[in-house]
Image (cartoon, rainbow, N blue to C red):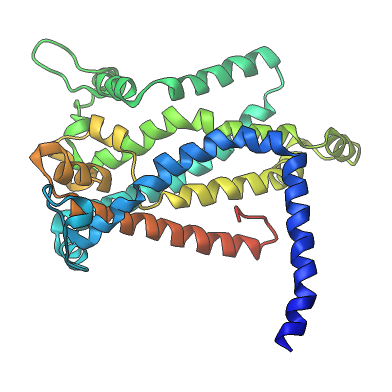
Amino acid sequence: MSQKTSAIAQPVLNKRKTGFITYIKKYWFLYMLILPGFISMVIFDYGPMYGIQLAFKKYSPKAGVWGSQWIGLDNFQRMIADPSFVRAFTNTIIINIYHLIFGFTFNVFLALMLNELKFRKYKSVMQTCVYLPYFLSWVIFSGLVQVFLESPGTADSGGLVNQLIAMAGGQPIDFLKRPELFRGILVISSIIKTSGYSTIVYLAAIAGIDPALYESAAIDGANRKDALIHITFPRILPSVVIMLILQLAGLFLSNFDQVYNLYNNYVLSTGDVLSTYIYRISLGGGGTDFELSTAMNLIMNLMGLVVVGITNKYVSKLDVQGIF
């Protein structure tokens, strides 16, 4: 029976192999186009993954990554028992949830409002203004934030925000040294810097909507609000879902450039996140705990992958296509 089955399956396999080779020969130019990117991904993305084993070892520079002593899950136990890790993990989750609630929804709102602008020149100016901060590095943008929020000194009246507070009769606030305000500063500064660029995806999706739908709705008596609710938003919902899934993928990660350039010892209780904590124990501050930092990164990325998988499965039940 097995020989008969093999005899039947062999022509099918040969046919598939021939079809695959024919397909490669037909579209060889496209494969050549993606080959440099594929090679780069293998070398710089998959190649360094051999270092993941550090999470299960006691690293010795002399022995190297492969030769270091295997200690199993000891690094993960140290991670869970570390109060600084728990604090950084909690701060990361809270800040990212704030980003998700306020930043993500604002991006969608901003795209819809920009699309509603009918005066072309004014629309172009507004788009340029909201896109511009994205092209500034976090070093520069964080410096601008510090200048605006600077507290009054002996020889100056502080930043613009504190000057406005003083003009209104209020007391100046040292924003960057107030732990209860720091998370809000991170979220607001991130929205200002990145929201404009994030709207490009939604504006591209809006541009692909058939204008005949709006014309038909106008004939039926629909106003601009009705068209926004019943035509524009449902048509960009797949793009919104994709962007939501991608943002959830980073729920356990954090923007190192932003936090590192804004935080200080006064706000560690609410501003220290996983990326800055990992940097301190592995590179910054003289730390060399590479195995513990590897274990943290591994767990955070695996948790992000699980969240993406669950979210993708859930949105597929809503008749919306996910990322896979």
Residue that appears at 21% across and 52% down: 65
Placement of the N terminus among the 4 image quadrants: bottom right
Q: Nearer the viewer, residue 134 or 4?
A: 4
Residue drawn 57% across the image and 33% down it: 199
| Residue 240 visible at all | yes
Decide if residue 205 is in sight here.
Answer: no
**Residue at the image position 73 percent from the left and 52 percent from the top:** 20
Going by the image, does 198 lie left or right of 165? Answer: right
Residue 286 % position (x, y): 8, 39
Q: Position of residue 18 (x, y in %)?
A: 77, 55
Farthest residue to the bottom: give it. Answer: 1
Residue 194 lies, in percent from the top left, at 46, 31
Number of dots carrying numbers: 0
Q: Is residue 65 left or right of residue 8?
A: left
Q: Identify which residue, 205 or 67, lies in the foreground.
A: 67
Residue 67 higher or lower than 247, as above or below: below
From the viewer's perspective, is 318 left or right of 100? right
| As drawn, 241 above or below 12 | above
**Left or right of 26 in this view: 273:** left
The picture quadrant where one finds residue 154 is top left
- Residue 36 pos. (x, y %): 54, 33
Which quadrant would the C terminus be assigned to in this image?
bottom right
